[in-house]
Image (spheres, helix red, strand yellow):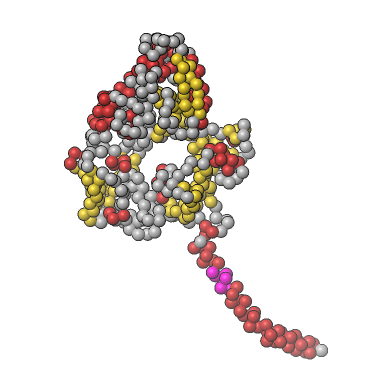
Amino acid sequence: MIVFRRRLIFWLIKAYFKKWGRSILVFFAIGLFAFFALRILIKILPSTFLFIPKETVGVAGSFTVNDLPSYILTSVSRGLTSVSEDGNVRPDIAQSWKIADNGREYTFFLRKNVYFSDETRLTSKNVTYNFSDASILRPNEYTIIFRLKEAYSPFLITVSRPIFKKGFVGLGSYKVKSIKFNGDFVTSIDLISIKSNKKIIKYQFFPTEDALKTAFVIGEVSKISGIHDVTFKDKKINSFKSVTVKKVLNDKQLITLFYNTQDRILSEKKIREALSYAVPDKFENGKRNPGPFSPNSWANQKLDIRMQDIEHAKNLLSASEGASDSSKLIVIIKTLPQYKNTAKILLESFKKIGVVPRIEIVDTIPSNFQMFLGDFNLLKDPDQYVLWHSGQNSNISRYKNLRIDKLLEDGRKTIDINTRKKIYLDFEKYILDDPPASFLYLPYTYEISRN
């Protein structure tokens, strides 16, 4: 009986394999192949799986691929030079350089064994800066020469701009994994670390700070930076659970009250001086910066700070011709939305000296104004030629001062840094004496992240 049962089981197994054996072998081979293929794919394409962490950073503003924020560009590539916080230039891709012909010729000697993220070697032919006023020579693979039409001392800072090959391939610690557009504008960009393909940062762009804060609250992004306030629908974001808020001083932007120096009232120097003396010594939204330079710049000579002096401001105003017809001057401050509260503070200060401003909110720099409350970027070099020189269309104050023009011209043509320091010391003294603007403060911004 036992023998019969054993034979029966054997016959059944034999019959089963006879009928299904081929299918079993085929599916076993497929399963074995899939197992090893999956192991290989996990190593090659880890970022495609959900368990690979990705930091999503929200950014406010509209950017094309050519004007992305500097912290993104410098993550992806490097320039011939690099620039320290105080504006001093250091070697980067170029290990050294020499300047000839009174600042009109710059020769850079490239480092060897520098590679792009696609593992191709950097040579002089890959340095493709496009300067309209310069000719370029490449005598060998590791030397590049720029010949300028005229001397330009900020040139060493200009070539700190990151270098890219076609396809946004750079020389930095990250490479571009993907990039999405809406027309010419970037909507998001994913960067992946060169050293670890498990480290990915996604930058997502939003048109306004309000849209950015909404994206953070609903969990679309895990971190946001550069916003000017932490209020969301009348509630502070730092009151939310598992949220960290960090206040940061932005020393690369200067909030400024620009005067239209061709205006009937503000064309008079004494009135602009009076307004400058009425400016408060402190601002809740930033750190007071009464001069045109960053406090970290080598050009900042730490002149005596012009403190608020209401009585002196009143005396200047009463001695002015523009205030002689009336006891009060009525002017208009046009302001960007983010500086509305600052405009209100200025309004109260100006009232104390007999000036009555009205406030108008504008979305962009107005073509016509009496006073405009906005900002300008403090570049790594102290050259402010485009902002204050009388021959520039970007001189929104319509400022004309021959002494300032000459100092700005000399400042950008002089190579010796000690001579440039003297030039910009004079520039700062004279522009504060005949102010086309009142320099207010460096703004506080906020970085918000989810724990």
Can residue 33 be found in the magenta stretch?
Answer: yes
Q: Position of residue 414 (x, y in %)?
A: 23, 34
Residue 137 shows in the view:
yes
Q: Is residue 30 left or right of residue 179?
A: right
Q: Quadrant of the N terminus?
A: bottom right
Q: Is residue 416 left or right of residue 191?
A: left
Q: Position of residue 390 (x, y in %)?
A: 30, 29
Most foreground residue, 228 or 42: 228
When the figure is inspected, residue 33 is found, relative to residue 125, above or below; the finding is below
Residue 447 shows in the view:
no
Most foreground residue, 9 or 224: 224
- Which secondary structure dominates the residues rendered in magenta? helix
Residue located at (50% from left, 24% from top): 359
Stretch in magenta: 32-37
Q: Position of residue 423 (x, y in %)?
A: 26, 28
Q: Quadrant of the C terminus?
A: top right
Residue located at (55% from left, 36% from top): 245
Can residue 271 be found in the magenta stretch?
Answer: no
Q: Position of residue 353 (x, y in %)?
A: 45, 13
Residue located at (53% from left, 38% from top): 209
When the figure is inspected, residue 330 is found, relative to residue 224, above or below; the finding is above
Q: Pick out the residue farthest to the left.
A: 101
All told, the count of numbered labels is: 0
